[in-house]
Amino acid sequence: MDEELVPIDEVARRVGLRASAIRYYEQRGLIAPAVRSAGRRWYRPAEIRRLAVIRYWQRSALMSLDDIADLLAGRPDPTWARVIETQIESLQAKADRLRAARALLEHTLEHHRDAPPDGCPHYEQLIWTSEGHAGHHDEQR
């Protein structure tokens, strides 16, 4: 067997995936084994790298396999760029929510260590100006 080829179990160990995930990616057309021999799949370095890219994009960019497939296909139309733009917008929204949550928790620790923050003007402003609640507080007055 060609020494460049690596069996699926070794690929799984190197990339940090389960062999079942690799087979699933193969089913989806994201990768292809170089050879099937004696019931085992064998992969070349290019496919191992592609698996590492898929895993990295899933974890780092929080992308779906459909989006990753589009990007890996290198589609020349603007669709792949829109996928990235949408993902950037989504990540920005998540980052904004995380920053707000952190600020709330830091405020609570700093000013309300011994009692709940109910009634705190800062806390009340956050509650009534958050998405979906703006204006509702005034209606109840």
Image: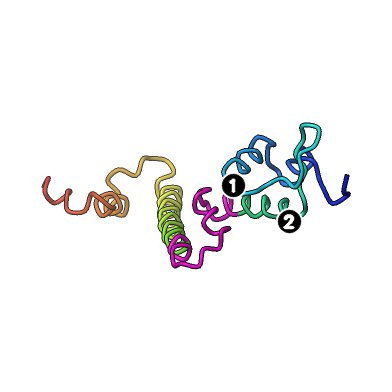
Q: Which residue is mark 2?
A: 46
- Label 1 or label 2, whichever comes before in sequence order: 1
What is the magenta range? 57-83
Of labels 1 and 2, the one closer to you: 1
| Residue 13 picture quarter | top right
Q: Does residue 129 belong to the magenta stretch?
A: no
Report the front residue among 107 and 46. 46
Between the residue at mark 1 and the residue at mark 2, the CA separation in whole angstroms equals 15 Å
Badge 2: residue crowd in 10 Å (few <14, some 14–19, many ≥20): few
Report the front residue among 3 and 13. 3
Tell me where residue 23 appears, x and y as whole percent.
Answer: 65, 38
Tell me where residue 40 appears, x and y as whole percent.
Answer: 77, 35
Please determine whether, in this image, residue 73 is positioned above or below residue 33.
below
Q: Main secondary structure of the magenta part?
A: helix
Inspect the image, locate mark 1, and give the three-letter code of the amino acid beneath it: Gly
Q: Which residue is mark 1?
A: 29
Element assignment for label 1: loop
Badge 1: residue crowd in 10 Å (few <14, some 14–19, many ≥20): few
Query: Viewed as shown, does residue 121 lie left or right of 18?
Result: left
Tell me where residue 109 appears, x and y as whole percent.
Answer: 45, 48
Q: Residue at x 40, y 46 (%)?
A: 112
Query: Viewed as shown, does residue 89 lie left or right of 10?
Result: left
